[in-house]
Amino acid sequence: MNYLDRNEFNFEPSQKVLDAVKNFDAKDLCFYTRIYDQGKKSVISVRVSEIYGVPEEQVLLAYGGEEILKNAIHYFLMEGDNKRILIPEFSWWYYNRVASECGGTFEMYPLYEQEDTFAYNVDEVIEYTNRIHPRMLLLASPNNPTGNSLTSEEIGRIMENIPSDTMVLVDEAYASFITSDVDYIAPLVNKYSNLIISRTLSKFYGLPGLRTGFGFIGKGHDQFLSYSNKYLGFNRFAEAVALAALDSDDHYRRVAEDMEWDRQLFKKELGNVPGFKVYKSVANFILIKYPTSIKEKLQKALAAQDYKIKFMTDKGLEDCLRITLGRREQIQVVVDTIKQCLA
């Protein structure tokens, strides 16, 4: 089955990752990884601290970016009486569910369609946050499923103009597809104590099955760090593979560049077809508006070839497809199948 509906990785891991798996010594699993005697969480947090220039004690580690999200929302919404969180209108449905798990209430602020993209209205996000004064504000950059992002300047402007007791979580699961620049993270985290930035090895590094996420938090949250950290350490196998992935940026950057071929194929073959709109994407997926009259026919045609794409059901996006960017031959099959269903 070709799963192009889950934003997973349809390419090869780096050679360093393959070597780390092949050469892992199973005897290492006989011992905990905790290194609290040195005041450190993990060899991963130490390496991430070096790469991103953020003090190790402010690095978050978790079972994927999902756990950073869940830990933060559960902790901060249960901490006091304010249980409100603001989330983007067109975004990952899981944000809503995590808030409801801990008795939180959510409100959505809008994203706006602008020609062939979606966008945050930064001034409106600031206005919403000040008016509602939630305990948490969630920003997704790039956002799933719309594929749009915020600049570091826009994040800084939001942080500068909202209440300092509103925790802001920026979900950057797909951020490495935009740029290799990470120099903006340390200054933001150092300046704003109410900021959390979440990343993962699941998307750019193509290791969703490893379940390893990392992130950063502003100063002064010792209780949250105690809540989220693993006292006995992490998974030794995952640590070894994660270190190899973090040391393989060149490989994964080439994969990210290959995905541009996919984007251009969709734009070339479907961009000018009546009923279609190919939205800009800076992630490993693309959103495409399509004529829903072909939905059933397209579903059957793709299933016959063991292909799955995401037929959106979110309010306002019911006439859209979200397609994971995969290998060239996979994307060619999807494009050809869509065109055949139009014939």
Image (spheres, rainbow, N blue to C red):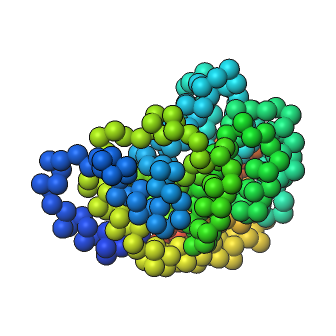
Task: Give the image location of residue 20, x and y in percent.
Answer: 26, 67
Q: Does 217 sit left or right of 38 as displayed? A: right
- Quarter of the N terminus within the rendering: bottom left
Residue at x 40% of width, y 74% of height: 248
Q: Quadrant of residue 154?
A: bottom right
The extreme left residue here reads 27
Q: Is residue 257 left or right of residue 184?
A: left
Q: Position of residue 63 (x, y in %)?
A: 41, 45
Q: How many marks?
A: 0
From the viewer's side, name the closer residue of 325 and 111.
111
**From the image, which quarter does the C terminus lie in?**
bottom right
Please give the name of the residue rendered at 59% of the width and 24% of the height, measured from the top-left corner: 78
Q: Is residue 252 in sight in this rendering?
A: yes
Q: Is residue 207 left or right of residue 32?
A: right
Q: Nearer the viewer, residue 82 or 4?
A: 82
Coordinates of residue 284 in the picture (x, y in percent): 56, 64
Closer-to-camera residue (104/41): 41
